[in-house]
Amino acid sequence: MSLASVIRSEQELLLPTYDRQKVLFEKGRGVYLWDTRGQPYLDFLSGIGVNALGHRHPAIQRVLRQQASRLIHISNLFFHPYQAELARRLTKISGLERAFFANSGTEAWEGALKLARAYARSLATNGHRPKWRILALDHSFHGRTMGSLATTGQAKYRNPFGPLVPGVSFVRFNDVEDLRRHFDGSVCAVCLETIQGEGGIRPLQAEFLAAARALTQKSGALLLLDEIQCGLGRTGRYFAYQHYQVEPDIVTLAKPLAAGLPLGAILTTRRVANAIDPGMHGTTFGGGPLVCRVAIEFLRVLEGLLPRVGELGGYFRERLEWLRSQYGSVVEVRGMGLMLGMELDSADLAKDVVARLLARRILINRTSETVLRFLPPYIIQKQHIDQLIRALSQALAGARPKPGPALRTSVARSHR
């Protein structure tokens, strides 16, 4: 099947929700994808953070084959061996105590919002109205279901679908005073991405996260952290919040958890989990035997990769900072580990650079219009980072006046 025929078929049959790049992929291995012409592409996006172990990882393939030959789905009306084991591993590495498995990140976040409201209702006594307001952040992105959209601090995602879930107010990003102004006794939850992904690879400042934790602890509200993109090893630790020495009440996970299969998770404390009774929440597909067994294997492999994620992330950031020193069009480099963004001074330039890298068969994307987003697989090597840096340098030079000889010399030296 040709790219042109696939495009025609999709135009006739699918909802027009995606502005796809015109490449037709048919296989992958390691850090590479191959199109139908047999051309390899270096993958620095990993399915927007999903393929953290790259493509066709042998351990994942082995478990997939074994479990698919035994049991794929039974529904949550019955037991299987792998949900409790996966929950045990996740609670151990997170410091939390209870888990719920869903199908996706947005479903996990939707469930977390319900849990926060249920917990607040469980504490209401003597006829007092339960806490119900939710505080979220500008620039945030939590998903595309109605509750997740309601807490997403970007009007372009929310406005076409209003009115959304009521009771949500937005706080300026990393503005402690604005957080305090919005916070009162009616707030049941403060909702944060530890590192904003779709919002432009923006890490929370330690002071802001500490203030959110202090306010919620004092009032009895909950601190909800969305680690769907930044969690599970992406920053060099299991969870990004572990860089801050803050303990949340609820954490949501998804993207890399089942190594490409759809699986999301809510982690929470025993105290908060007690607000949920049978029948109050559920899922048909979430936490089936196949996805849970694959997720257990992912966590086993991840344990050995964490140190190199931090090391390679540091090297990658150094190389991006070097580019910033060479090109005035690079405004800032942000992020942690292998979740990095490079902000450029215009949306047109960012779009052009993404296209130029695609022409060189390197996959990245842009977010928040002007930010180049890098989410490579954890198995990436320095030689792949160097290849990307050379391509970025050439793309930036092609889009703006070329730098002097010092840049070309430095690029050649970094390659050696």
Image (tube, rainbow, N blue to C red):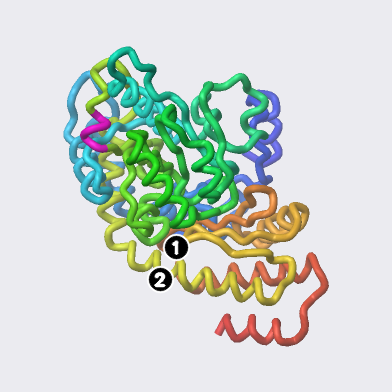
Q: Is residue 108 magenta?
A: no
Name which residue lies at 37% across and 36% down.
263
Mark 2 surroundings within 10 Å by alpha-carbon count, few (fewer than 14), some (14 through 19), many (20 or more): few
The amino acid pointed to by label 2 is: Glu
| Magenta-colored span | 269-273
Q: In this view of the protein, which residue sits in the foreground, 190 or 228? A: 190
Secondary structure at badge 2 equals helix
Q: Position of residue 27 (x, y in %)?
A: 50, 49
Q: Is residue 288 left or right of residue 359?
A: left
Q: Is residue 252 left or right of residue 278?
A: right
Secondary structure at badge 1 equals loop
Residue 414 drawn above or below residue 213: below
Name which residue lies at 29% across and 30% down.
288
Residue beneath label 1, please? 337
Write down the quadrant of residue 337 in the picture: bottom left
Image quarter (top left, top right, bottom left or bottom right) of the N terminus: top right
The amino acid pointed to by label 1 is: Gly
Disc 1 and disc 2 in contact, CB within 8 angstroms: no
Name which residue lies at 51% across and 34% down.
143
The label shown at residue 311 is 2
Q: Position of residue 304 (x, y in %)?
A: 28, 62
